[in-house]
Image: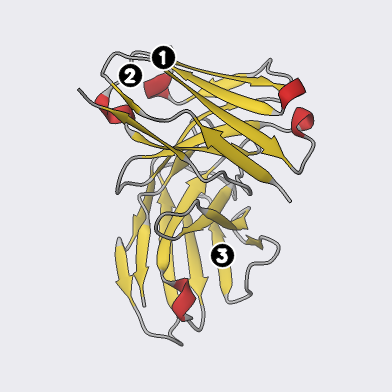
Amino acid sequence: IQMTQSPSTVSASVGDRVTITCRASQSISNWLAWYQQKPGKAPKLLIYTASTLESGVPSRFSGSGSGTDFTLTISSLQPDDSSTFYCQQYDSYPYTFGQGTKLEI
Amino acid sequence: EVQLVESGGHLVQPGGSLRLSCVASGFTFRIQWMSWVRQAPGKGLEWVANINDDGSEKHYMDSVEGRFTISRDNAKNSLFLEMSSLKAEDTAVYYCAQRESLFDHWGQGTLVTVSS
């Protein structure tokens, strides 16, 4: 299953609302996760089953979608949100990630 | 606190072999699926392989099937990745990750460089 994210890069300002999209090449129901990665660090799980927030993740992060189209929304951007975001499907093997979206604040 | 510590990555020639290790602590390792995920320099994430709690079920990405072997030693809370017939495109940071499909804890990664 191919995962395609858009845009590849997004620039925004502190306080802005940003939406990143992820499209699957076939239906994955809601078996989708979002990760945040900062340079030189391991990824961090943000959201799973498309819209469930991982414990400890700020509520300004939210996810939605099902089937083939999904979105990650960050409301009220903070400076610390500068990072790369990846979607991942875990509906079927081999598990696959999107190519990443770099968020520049 | 969950901790995953990888080791074993270094420079290896094309066609060579390498064994990566990951030592786990802070959770009951023997009942947990474990995975390897890699990231080529400047590139995105790739799921590589996973293994069930007792080692009886394993899955691999297509491009490493037959060349890589995932295994574990529950007595030593350790996960392994045996890599052979290494290619330049296997160059990456290899992360050990907790769970089968949803990776809520990751190690710091170990760098494998395949080059002559």
Judge whether B39 appears above or below B19 on screen: below
Q: Chain of mark 3?
A: A
Residue A68 at least partly seen: no
Using a 10 Å C-alpha cutoff, classify the residue at mark 2 as few (fewer than 14 neighbours), some (14 to 19) or many (20 or more): many
Mark 2 and mark 1 in contact (Cβ < 8 Å)? yes
Q: Which mark is residue B67?
A: 1
In the displayed orientation, state which residue is furthest to the left: B116
Residue B6: horizontal and vertical position, in percent? 54, 35
Q: Residue B38 occupies which quadrant of the picture? A: top left
Q: Nearer the viewer, mark 3 or mark 2?
A: 2
In what element is the residue under mark 1? loop
Circle 3: residue type: Gly
- The residue that label 2 is drawn on is B86
Residue B99: horizontal and vertical position, in percent? 66, 38
Judge whether B82 appears above or below A73 on screen: above
Q: Chain of mark 1?
A: B
- The residue that label 3 is drawn on is A63
Residue A42: horizontal and vertical position, in percent? 50, 51
